[in-house]
Image (tube, helix red, strand yellow):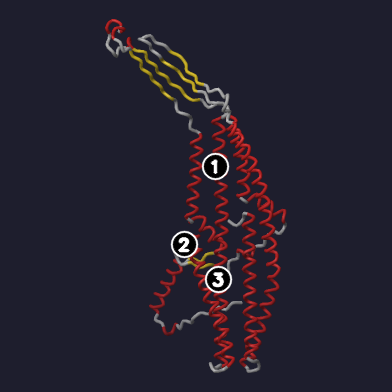
Amino acid sequence: MLKFFTMRLWYSKISPSFLIVLCFLGGSLANAQQNLSLSTSIQLALDRNTAVEIEKWYNQLAIIEVEKSKIRPNPTFNAQILMLTNPRFYPDNNLYISPYNRQDWFQLTKRMQVLGQRKNKIALQNQNLQTRHLEFADYKRKLAYDVSISWLELWFAQINKDIANEAVLLLQNLTKAKKLKPEDLEFLRFKILDDQYDMLYAYASLNYNQEIETLKLLTATVDTLTINMNDTFFDTPISQNLDSLYQLAYVHRADYLKTISDTKSQQINLALQRSNSFPTPEFGVIANPQNTIPYFGFFLTQPIPLFDRNQAEKQKAKTNISISKATNSYTVLQIQSEIKTSLISYQNYEFNKTRVKRMLEDSQLLMTSVRKLFVEGKKTEVDLWESEQAWFDAEKLFYNNEYEYRKSKLELLHALGLLH
């Protein structure tokens, strides 16, 4: 167990007014500082991370594309005014602009969407919107994993700081109790060990500060940040039945669901391209007064699909269906591989937990006994130095295994799509 050292406050020497101010300041600092559990860190990132906001705007673009697909083609208005240019043909000497000297043409037409073209276009954009939502869900899945790993790295850095700090303080207390002098040969041995602990503490402190900044960036936190070292997130067991885990992943993995949605999109796109094989006709009405004599008629333009029958787009749609199906098959294999790999690691480190815990307990017992005998003069500095190193190595091994166990659990939850 780690020992945490705190300074004692001698209340008898401090005025009551100072205590009140101290309590007030302490309460304010506690409100400013966030003590984050793993789940809270993930939720903060999903709620406040700027990159998530950007992804939401991409969702909005997909919604706009759905609305755009519902818009019908505009009608087209065409007007033609033909006038006589030779006055000798003007009847009854009319003015140049007289309707008796003109032939007017007014045409109103509209391109028609036929054979389900509009329906398929709307269906395609709706399916693309579903795909976009799944892309967003997969982005959040990956972000949750990044946050959880950052949180775990910060936890491990704090553990390493505490181990090194504890080792330094206990070693200093022992050397003082034994009253070793700098000229003693064994003093040099303990000085080397002490420097080693100091270096480990310095490295852990640097790593801790770096991980703090990473987690603050991911969670969009500006206040002082700490993590809950006693988080119970990792206490919940995970099923180790592969078939059950596969089924969980197929339900919750957004990247897998996206490949299914992609296939549906390409199938709808094929139907749309088949509809587009038939050229869209343009239909309308014509008003054509000729020298004040009214004429009325209809207008129709129909391209003849003699050469261009949309062959390329149909072939591309069929190819994209094959690609999306192949992607789905590959994603299934990838998910299964990720689950197997992370499950093997999880089982291995879970099995080692009992062994390294027993090893740590034995090393602590050995160290406590040797320390007592060393102070009594019944053990040499070499014995103490060896027991100290054995304890320190065992504690590092214990927490290294705990770190790898937690990391493998996060990787397994990530592979299942359950982490966020």
Residue 57 got which mark?
A: none
The amino acid marked with disc number 3 is: Ala
Circle 1 — which element? helix
Residue depicted at 50% across the width and 41% down the height: 63
x, y percent for residue 218: 50, 60
Q: Quadrant of the C terminus?
A: bottom right
What residue is pinned by disc 3? 157
Give the residue drawn at x 64%, y 56%: 415
Sequence-first tag of 3 and 1: 1
Q: Which mark is residue 221?
A: 2
Q: Comparing marks 2 and 3, which lies closer to the viewer?
A: 3
Q: Which of label 1 and label 2 is nearer to you?
A: 1
Instruction: Give the image location of residue 114, x and y in percent.
Output: 55, 26
Q: Secondary structure at mark 2?
A: loop
For badge 2, the amino acid type reads: Thr
Q: Residue at x 41, y 72 (%)?
A: 25
Residue hosting label 1: 129
Q: Residue furthest top?
A: 92
Amino acid of disc 1: Leu
Cα–Cα span, label 3 and label 1: 42 Å
Whether residue 48 sits left or right of residue 174 in the image: it is left
Q: Quadrant of residue 164?
A: bottom right
